[in-house]
Image (cartoon, rainbow, N blue to C red):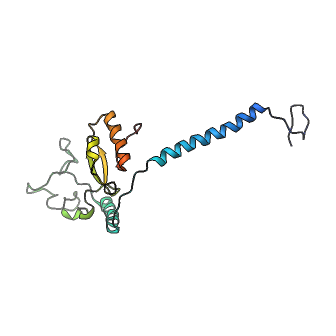
Amino acid sequence: MVVSETGVAGAPEEVPEEVKEEAEEAPKEAEEAEKAVETSEERYRPPKPSLSPEQERLLKVRREINRKRPRFIRMNSWYLARLPDSWRNPSRSLDNKIRLQKKGFPAKVKVGYRNPRLVRGLHPSGFEEVLVHNPRELEGLDPSRHAVRIASGVGRKKRAEIIRRAQELGLRVLNVGGGIA
């Protein structure tokens, strides 16, 4: 039941034509904005790597190995503030407990912790990373195998050129960054 301005119940209230036109235009503008967003997303989608089933399996294995791998730290770094946590090989010293692999001490680096050879050095997405300093270095890269990482010393202007050229060539850029594209 609709109550009009006059207070009479049941009579539909009339809406001015200007309000109707504004109401019709608002959804149209929203639809156009959505289409613009969709077209910008459709314009560039980074490719996926072409991996063999064995490589896909080994990437999953590598993720599991990395999850279980212990944190390798330097002997006595946990109570000597002057020592960094970074790994040093405990090959010297008669009493080094990590070298002797004593229970209760951090794990020693061994070859058994290594990743599978077929996927060693690959980005987690499965691409081979290529460090790029300028747009010329993009030539000759395979979009199904290589992904581009822009060097940290590259400025904003050249970075934008590299990103634009990589999109033209269909290459994935791993560190696009915000606000530039």
Please tell me how many numbered marks the rendered image carries: 0
Q: Is residue 116 visible?
A: no
Q: Residue at x 18, y 44 (%)?
A: 83
The quadrant in which residue 82 appears is top left
Q: Residue furthest bottom?
A: 54
Residue furthest right as drawn: 8
Q: Quadrant of the N terminus?
A: top right
Question: Is residue 59 at least partly visible in the picture?
Answer: yes
Residue drawn 52% across and 43% down? 37
Q: Residue at x 35, y 61 (%)?
A: 50
Is 95 left or right of 181, judged from the image as shown? left
- In the picture, residue 120 is in which quadrant? bottom left
Residue depicted at x 28% and y 39%? 152
- Relative to 25, say whether 117 is above or below: below
- Work out whether residue 106 or residue 52 is closer to the camera in this orientation and state it: 52
Q: Position of residue 102 (x, y in %)?
A: 18, 62
Q: Is 69 rendered above or below residue 24?
A: below
In this rendering, would 115 be left or right of 164?
left
Q: Quadrant of residue 51?
A: bottom left
Give residue 27's position: percent from left, percent from top.
66, 40
Residue 93, percent from left and from top: 8, 54
| 79 up-or-down from 106: above or below | above
| Quarter of the rendering occupied by the C terminus | top left
Instruction: Depth check: give the residue in front, 45 or 151.
Output: 45
